[in-house]
Amino acid sequence: MIGKSKLIDATSEAIKTPVNIRLTQYAVRLSRKDLRLLVGLLTGHNTLNRHLTLLRRMDDPLCPLCGEDEDTSLHLLGNCCAIAEKRYEYSLEGIS
């Protein structure tokens, strides 16, 4: 559990971070469904196994795709070996 002083420090640092206007405008234009998904991925409040385990809705926090690590936003978007190829293909689409 995070201590109160650490939480206050982390919140203070987050508030000092400059706002990216372009990303803010993008988020505001999203549908309600897509905005909910984005906020869930950013905050960790989503339907991935790690969060559901914290809520006591599931028993296993591991990724159902690879089983190697906890199923978190960071794992899904950046580390899951089961979808590495899809992630790579998607990154190439952004280049062209």
Image (spheres, rainbow, N blue to C red):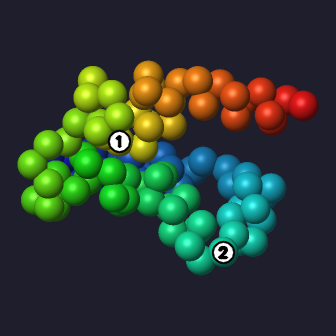
Front residue of 2/32: it is 32
Q: Residue at x 33, y 58 (%)?
A: 47
Question: Secondary structure beneath disc 1?
Answer: loop
Which amino acid type is shown beneath numbered disc 1?
Thr
Question: Secondary structure beneath disc 2?
Answer: loop
Which amino acid type is shown beneath numbered disc 2?
Ser
- Name the residue beneath numbered marker 2: 31
The mark found on residue 1 in the picture is none
Horizontal and vertical percent position of residue 87: 60, 30
Q: Residue at x 69, y 28 (%)?
A: 89
> Which sits earlier in the primary sequence, circle 2 or circle 1?
2
Q: Residue at x 26, y 53 (%)?
A: 51
Residue 54 can be seen in this image: no
Q: How many numbered markers are drawn? A: 2
Compute the Cα span from label 2 to label 1: 23 Å
Q: Residue furthest right?
A: 96
Horizontal and vertical percent position of residue 75: 40, 33
* Label 2 neighbour load within 10 Å: few <14, some 14-19, many 20+: few
Q: Is residue 87 above or below residue 71?
A: above
- Name the residue beneath numbered marker 1: 72
Horizontal and vertical percent position of residue 91: 72, 30
In the picture, measured across the screen, residue 4 lies left or right of residue 41, that is left
